[in-house]
Image: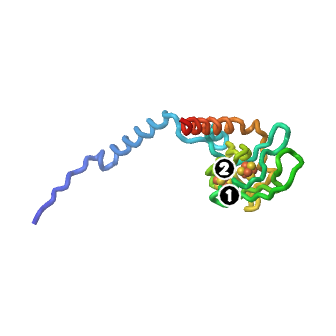
Amino acid sequence: MVIIKRKQLTWMEKAYLPEVIRGLRITLGKMFQKPSTRQYPEDPLITTEVTRGQPRLVVNEDSTIRCVSCGLCEIACPAYAITIDGQETDRMIEREPEKFEIDFLRCILCGFCEEACPKEAIMMSDELELADTSRQGLIYGLDKLKRPVSALKKRIAYINKINDRWRTSSST
Ligand code: SF4
Ligand code: SF4
């Protein structure tokens, strides 16, 4: 028969004092470190031109919409989130959207619509917040999607820079 002699615990070990002291040391150390959490929404998320928020439709300075209702973004969208109906217009471009809807319950913010668009008419904005009390409220129409070009100019410049790099490398 094997007799196992257990180690006798000291009174400190019985009172878990080493663990308590170690825990307090970690807590005190963390108290003086820069917090990695954010007090949202008072402290909003930082966004840059690289941020891929919800897609928005660009409105020119003369209040015309850039979209020519070609439907390329609708085809490119892997989530089938975009629905467009086009109509004729008196302007130089032949068409413009009569109806342009994005279902944000489907949208996965992939940016394929932005890449597919030949007119820089749909761009990923820095708008990340999305909330409503109904499913219908999250289907955005033209009125909710339009943004002035000034609000999207940083993103447009960023995408142009990316595309220029690609064009340069493919032409050499
Ligand atoms: S970001 Fe992606 S999922 Fe959302 S509308 Fe554009 S293509 Fe569709
Ligand atoms: S690809 Fe651009 S121009 Fe064509 S329908 Fe979409 S947003 Fe409009």
Specify whether 87 is left or right of 127. Answer: right
Q: Would residue 90 appear left or right of 99 to someone viewing this image? A: right
Reading the chain from its start, which is encountered first: label 2 or label 1? Answer: 1
Which residue is nearer to you in this view: 64 or 15? 64
Does residue 31 sit above or below 52 in this rendering? above
Q: Which amino acid does label 1 sit on?
A: Ile
Q: Residue 116 carries which label?
A: 2
Residue found 67% across the figure and 45% down from its top: 124
Q: Which of 123 and 141 is in front in this view?
A: 123
Q: Distance between the residues labelled 2 and 1?
A: 9 Å
Q: Farthest residue toward the bottom? A: 1
Residue 61 x, y percent position in the rendering:
82, 37
Neighbour tally class for label 1: few under 14, some 14-19, many 20 plus, Cα within 10 Å: some
Q: Which quadrant would the N terminus be assigned to in this image?
A: bottom left
Q: Residue furthest front?
A: 172
State the image coordinates of residue 77 (x, y, percent, origin top left): 65, 56
Callout 2 secondary element: helix
Q: Position of residue 38 (x, y in %)?
A: 59, 41
Q: Tell me: is circle 2 under 8 Å from ligand 2.
A: yes
Choose top left, top right, bottom left or bottom right for residue 105.
bottom right
The residue singled out by tag 1 in the image is 75
